[in-house]
Amino acid sequence: MYPILWPFAVHLFAVLALIAGILVLSRFLGETHRQRATGEPYESGTVISGSAQLPVDAKFYLIAVFFVIFDLETLFIMAWALGVREAGWIGYVEAVVFIGVLLAGLVYLWRVGALHVGASTDKGSVP
């Protein structure tokens, strides 16, 4: 009724034993530091001073959103490319329309100046 699962069980046991072994070895062989600043956070070897709640210009968020949008659209195009034979000409036309909409959005963003990060000196303004 059930397939033989002993290879899976052996693999699972081996993985768990390897993880446990690595953790135990790192505990005994790893360095331990008990200095004054050991538990304090740092960035690139520099002790943090001041607040982490610094204002960030909204343009950086726009660039991040543009990246996510165009990255996801690239993923859709790659998925279409994998099934291009099954999609046929109808799928090709749909992909061309999709890419056309992407290009229209990119041209719009370019025209309104949303892609120019350093063009304005006004802090906090959104193009």
Image (cartoon, helix red, strand yellow):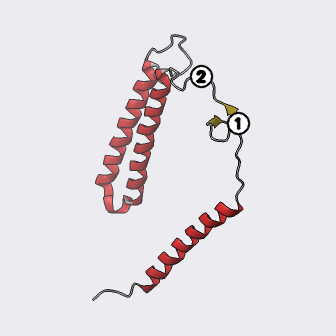
Callout 2: few (<14), some (14-19), or many (20+) C-alpha neighbours within 10 Å? Answer: few
Based on the displayed image, in which of its 4 quarters is residue 46 positioned? top right
Residue at 39 percent across and 36 percent down: it is 102
Q: Are marks 1 and 2 in contact (CB under 8 Å)?
A: no
Q: Residue 48, image x and y in percent? A: 63, 29
* CA–CA distance in space, label 1 to label 2: 16 Å
Q: Nearer the viewer, residue 7 or 87?
A: 7
Q: Residue 15, image x and y in percent? A: 53, 72
Q: Residue 42, image x and y in percent? A: 64, 35
Residue at 41 percent across and 59 percent down: it is 82
SS under mark 1 = loop
Based on the displayed image, in which of its 4 quarters is residue 31 positioned? bottom right
Q: Residue 71, image x and y in percent? A: 45, 42
Residue at 36 percent across and 62 percent down: it is 85
Tell me the number on the disc at residue 50.
Answer: 2
Q: Nearer the viewer, residue 98 or 39?
A: 39
Callout 2, which amino acid?
A: Gly
Q: Is residue 75 left or right of residue 97?
A: right
Tell me the number on the disc at residue 45.
Answer: 1
SS under mark 2 = loop
Q: Is residue 77 left or right of residue 93?
A: right
Q: Nearer the viewer, residue 108 or 23?
A: 23
Callout 1, which amino acid?
A: Gly
